[in-house]
Image (tube, rainbow, N blue to C red):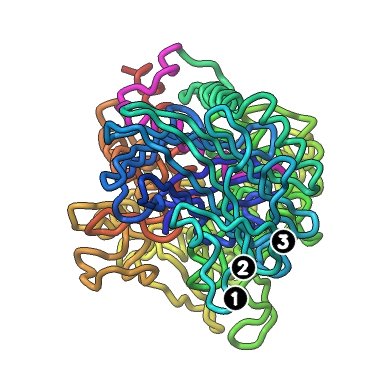
Amino acid sequence: MPRDLPVGNGTLLVNFDRRYVLRDIYYPHVGQENHTDGQPNRFGCWVDGEFGWIGDDDWRLDLRYDDESLVTRVSAANERLALELLCADGVDVGRNLFVRRVEVRDRAGLDRNVRLFQHLDLHLWGNAVGDTAFFDPDHRALIGYKARRHLWLGARAGDVDGLTRWATGTKGVGGKEGTWRDAEDGELGGNPIAQGSVDFVGGVDLPVAADGSAFAYFWIAAAERYDDARQLHGLVVQRGPESFLDRTKLYWTLWVNKEAPGRIDDQPVDTAVGDFGDLPPATVRLYKQSLLILRTQIDHAGAIVAATDADILQFGRDTYTYMWPRDGALVAHALCGAGYGQVTARFFQFCAEVMTDDGYLLHKYNPDGSLGSSWHPWLSTGGAKQLPIQEDETALVIWALWAHFRRFRDVEFVSSLYRKLIVTAADFLCRFRDPRTGLPAPSYDLWEERHGIMTYTTAAVVGGLEAAANFVAAFGDRPLAVRYREAAAQIRAAAREHLFDAERGHFSRMVRVRPDGTIQRDVTLDASIAGAHQFGLLPVDDPLLVATMEAVERRLWCQTPVGGVARYEDDYYHQTSRDLDRVPGNPWFICTLWLADWHAARATTVAELARSRELIEWVTAHALPSGVLAEQVHPETGEPLSVSPLTWSHAAFVESVTGYVRRRVALSRLD
């Protein structure tokens, strides 16, 4: 189930699904060690002999964030219980502390005694082997631990601190569903300790006056040691849980408003760019929420994680919780353009640390810097040795780093990466070439599905080499600059000769070079050929590029009321329709935004920006109410498909909005 509400601080990340069920707790790395394994962690209430878990079908939910913050604003109403719960959730900006506030409102016109229950299904270190859960009588709290991982559940109801009800137990063993079942009669058995595959439930009693409301809080402290968790708990009791929500909201509001979107490179611009031009308020809200959601998916050590939705684990026994250098570079580029260089600097340092001595980045990495799982083999189908890489990933890191340097001019920072990251990678890009065509040598495509010479990869390599040439020229290494620019020019010319399909009138997704030197062409139209624009392979008004982008818009646009651009013709991934004339594939946010970027770049007047604005607003219309963007949407219903949120989707939206506003400012000066 998609994740509607992520809240985090770069070390602790908590995800809620669209039924407002807590599903993921990542600590101490975003995207690594999910201490719930994506399982439901239930929250429920009992009143007048009736019980309900939030997320059951009889709850009416509205899931959002407070404006310009990473504190949630959730309403949950239940007619059967005659209760409404107004909830706020946040992870403290400076401590590994999750806090939930629950305001319970009576809708029966009666004095009520409400019991609230928080459940935690432990999978510490990502598995349910050897966990311990126990009740701490000194603090009236529940603690789950294994080795150097502790989760501490504390509570306050009204002015009473501590849990008034509790139980620990086993789950998934001997047919046991879990201790959460013990809460459904409004009582808890009080078992003080359990070990193995365990869960626990803590409850509080909250009197609510007729037609009135009352407040309760639950909090989860994450720490390596019991004493550290206990100290966090004591701080919450001392200062009050509300103070942590208040300061978290204020911090993120300040953070997300620190930059204007229309700044052009490193030059100051008119005060007009302090606003968003003619973009509607809903788009402005989504832009800011996208920045905030992006921040939740970035680990404190620099890894930009593709997605932290653990639901996909149930299908392929693997996740998106890795740092793909390509996704990370594109996110970093978008954040640099939006003015968030301190966040992205750690990403480039991460890449420098994991880059091979030969100058390339491998498929993907865990947030702690270790090598991630991969399906790219070191042998080709013919048995020859090959590099198991997507070459665009290496090139795009250098391309994004140049955007960072151009914006922030942090010379000392870049000098620390100059030899290890920039020169080493650029040298690799120069030599990793097909000798017969001059194009980049075959590697895996950005969709990780095929091996060959891609238009997208070729464009990325040109962008990376030109960025490297800019760097080495700035640092006075002119011979290297000449070498890199010559390589980029050769590849650009080879792309015109070999990658453009004159018969079909657009760039090919991929070519392979046969042993006799002839070209085998992949004729499938793929939105990724927009990379020819994105990374500057061709000028925006080049006839080959214009024909290519017009083909993408004409043939990959979904002919349904939903609309949007498909990834490629007959896209099998989460495919929902075989009517390929109407639905060439499910619409993807990033592919639709690539088209928006091209329309913005080619506009010569403000009026000509209209199509770009329409596409940006299409994304706004298909975001979840919380502002979360999935990977793709259903072509008939608009429902989110695949992982959600997808970090890349939010980055593409930020990139498109900032690009649109900048272009509008530039064109306004000409009018």
* Residue reaching furthest to the bottom: 382
Q: Is residue 43 left or right of residue 545?
A: right
SS class of the residue under badge 2?
Answer: strand
Residue sitting at x 35%, y 22% = 277
**Quadrant that contains the N terminus:** bottom left
Q: CA–CA distance between discs 3 and 2?
A: 10 Å
Check disc 1: other Cα within 10 Å, few if <14, some if 14-19, many if 20+. Answer: few
Locate residue 497, reporting x and y percent: 46, 62
What residue does disc 3 label? 132
Q: Are marks 2 and 1 in contact (CB under 8 Å)?
A: yes
Q: Would you name the residue on which mark 2 appears?
A: 170
* Quadrant in the picture for residue 438: bottom right
Element class at badge 1: loop
Q: Amino acid at mark 2?
A: Thr
The kind of secondary structure element at disc 3 is strand
**Residue at point 54% right, 32% down?**
337
Label 2 to label 1, Cα distance in Å? 7 Å
The stretch in magenta equals: 271-300
Report which residue position mark 1 lands on. Answer: 173
- Is residue 449 placed above or below 642 in the rendered structure? below
